Amino acid sequence: MDVVSDAISAVRIGRPTSDRVRISGRWCARFAPYEGAGFHVVLQGGCWLLPDGGAPVALAAGDAVLLPHGAGHVIADGPADAEAVARAVPFEEAVARRREREMDLGSGAGKGPGPGPGPVEMLCGKHRLDRSRTHPLMAELPQVVHLPNRVGAHPELRSAIDLLGREMDERRPGACIAVPSLLDLLLVYMIRSWVVAEGTPGTWPAVLGDPVASAALRALHSDPAAAWTTERLAAEAGVSRPTLARRFTSLVGRPPMAYLTWWRLNLAATLLRDSDDPLATVARRVGYATPYALSHAFNREFGTTPGRYRTLAGTP
């Protein structure tokens, strides 16, 4: 595993959901705050994202936008004013209203939506996330990650969007597996695009761009149960022990062995949540010799026992 994969795996729970929607005319719709990550992909037309407390973002065909912290927001046909935003109805209701008005127009029973922007097609979805043990890389993501559709930019993301659109269009055999898998892939590509983009501010893009710190992190995440020492990790990164300690600590914010302990315990929490493995098995998988040693460290980090944590994690 690598840092980005582990950071996502540690918080992702359940299956993502999404809908393909089409709306036209004048509209302004609200998405309530969500315990997870929301996303929108514009397939046709254009619209505006108005995040709560943030600057408006114009979205064009092919654009993708991720709201990694589940921030409340409004999607509208244009840069709506504060009054219009305050009156915004839930998105599902807005779509239903537009459909009803368009049906009235088709039957001659009403005046229809009137003049306004052309139709907009979007994929709108959510990923459920467990924020109790968020990796700092995930915590550092901005409220809005906007990935414009530019020629040559984010080719993997563009391919995933195309595949997802086709799967949701045709609903071919196997779509019930293919669509959630593509949605997971979309999440990975959006976060990766933010991490690797040139000039991205923040600690973790700098960490992953540093050859020493990134080499050490790859080693730790590839085999967290190994008998790591600072000397062994420095050899893996190809530098002296003082150089590793200085570079890693200044970038990551904690020494290598402290990071390893923290990550082992977070990995143990994920295994307790997602598996039925006995505690002895979990302890071995994360580098603790005995269940007692893991329990002692786990209680110190999380303020509860592994057994109690597993019970609470399994409570809906």
Image (tube, rainbow, N blue to C red):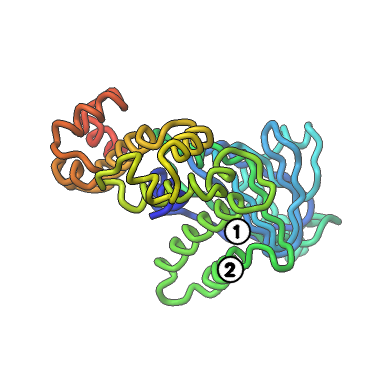
- Name the N-terminal-most of marks 2 and 1: 1
Distance of label 2 from label 1 (alpha carbons): 8 Å
Q: In the rendered image, which residue does mark 2 sit on?
A: 165
Q: Residue at x 67, y 54 (%)?
A: 147
Q: Position of residue 34 (x, y in %)?
A: 52, 39
* Quadrant showing the C terminus: top left
Residue 314 lies left or right of residue 134; in this view the side is left
**Above or below for 173 versus 4:** below
On screen, residue 240 versus residue 48, left or right, reads left
Q: Callout 1: few (<14), some (14-19), or many (20+) C-alpha neighbours within 10 Å?
A: some
Q: Which residue is mark 1?
A: 123
From the viewer's side, name the closer residue of 291 and 134: 291
Instruction: Give the residue at x 45% y 46%.
Output: 239
Numbered-mark total: 2
Which type of secondary structure does the marked residue at label 2 adopt?
helix
Expressed as whole percent of the image width and height from the top left, the position of residue 265 reads 30, 36
| Rendered location of residue 125, percent (x, y) | 54, 52
Residue 312 image point, x, y percent: 27, 32
Residue lying farthest front?
Answer: 240
| Picture layout, residue 303 above or below residue 233 | above
Viewer-closest of 2 and 220:
220
Q: Residues within 10 Å of mark 2 (few under 14, many from 20)?
A: some
In the rendered structure, which amino acid carries the disc numbered 1? Leu
- What quarter of the picture does the N terminus occupy? bottom left
Query: Which of the 4 image quarters holds residue 300?
Result: top left
Give the image quarter of residue 111: bottom right
Mark 2 residue type: Gly
Evaluate if marks 2 and 1 touch, with contact meaning CB atoms under 8 Å apart: yes
Q: Residue at x 52, y 33 (%)?
A: 250
Q: What residue lies at 78% left-to-right and 57% top-to-bottom?
A: 112
Question: Please, is residue 137 above or below residue 301 in the view?
Answer: below
